[in-house]
Amino acid sequence: MADIWQVALDHAVAIARQAGGVVHEALQYDRTVMTKSSTVDLVTQTDQKVENLIIQSVKQKFPTHRFIGEESVAAGEACDLTDAPTWIIDPIDGTTNFVHAFPFVAVSIGFSVNKQMEFGVVYSCLEDKMFTARRGKGAFCNGTPLQVSAQNDIKQSIIATEFGSSRDPEAVDYIFSSLRDILCIPVHGVRSAGTAAINMCLVASGCVEAYYEIGIHVWDVAAGSIIVSEAGGILTDVDGRAVDLMSRRIVAANNRTIAERIVKEIRPFNPPRDDAPPQQ
């Protein structure tokens, strides 16, 4: 009997590469910009086109599976992670990068069963890097195994983070207070690729020691989370507790020593959960 989850992973890789082709073409011809929650929370017709492409393709092959998609949720669908096989999709992670042709844009596809990530695919379209991981079977980039950095000294580390789309002054103060304290540990540097999925793949690749962010969404980090863990890294909440992908808060690090040191400097706050009931 065929390994059904391997079949699903192979399909995710194929459709991610196809979606990447759509992104490449759109970079040349169509980057029409719209906004969602704010003037800096961008969406394009390509985001919507790619998400529809992925969902329709998966539905044909796996008609009983469920979906959480960034643009579907933006259009009003529920963001509920159940025990059912569920595809968690960010059609363009790094939409602002895409709009500006900044060269880090990813298609992110995670797959969960019983609320546990079974596999993840992150295709960095413009780099032509296909990151994949399956639970218990390791993480890879273009077929080459990934391994997190062996660095234990935070002062010898590079840390990745993002600033999100919220421009609420209080949230911005929290973000920059944390950034200042981490930078002044001191660390070797702080980097921002503009996409959570690629930041997490950089952790998995050993290029950076950790990535943290408050305000991301489950579709930003679902695929990346299993890629990090299968490359030997760890995931926590920004307060050091177990990670909850619906909480919109995450630390992905090469090891617990680095994670715990970063957590000490973060000023946590609580954005609305992805699975929170819609406000009336």
Image: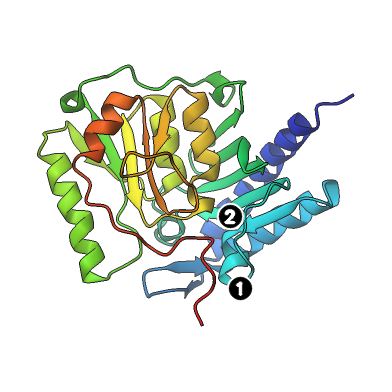
Q: In screen coordinates, is 123 left or right of 181? A: right
Q: Name the residue under label 2.
A: 91
Q: What residue type is labelled 2?
A: Pro
Q: In screen coordinates, is 14 left or right of 159? A: right
Viewer-closest of 49 and 155: 155
User: Residue at horizontal 19%, vertical 48%?
Assistant: 179
Quadrant of residue 169 within the rendered picture: bottom left
Residue 112 in the image, given as x and y percentages of width and height:
65, 42
User: Residue at horizontal 34%, vertical 49%?
Assistant: 213
Quadrant of residue 115 within the rendered picture: top right
Viewer-closest of 144 and 148: 148
Query: Disc 2 on helix, strand or loop?
Result: strand
Residue 279 in the image, given as x and y percentages of width and height:
49, 77
Q: How many labels does the image show?
A: 2
How packed is label 2: few (under 14 Cα within 10 Å), some, or many (20 or more)?
A: many
User: Residue at horizontal 73%, vertical 33%?
Assistant: 10
How far apart, in angstroms, are the residues tagged by discs 1 and 2?
Answer: 17 Å
Give me the disc on residue 149. Answer: none
How has the structure been colored for display?
rainbow
Residue 90 in the image, given as x and y percentages of width and height:
56, 53
Query: Disc 1 on helix, strand or loop?
Result: loop
Closer to the chain start, of discs 1 and 2, is: 1
Q: Name the residue under label 1.
A: 76
Quadrant of residue 182 within the rendered picture: top left
Badge 1 vs badge 2, beta-carbon distance below 8 Å? no
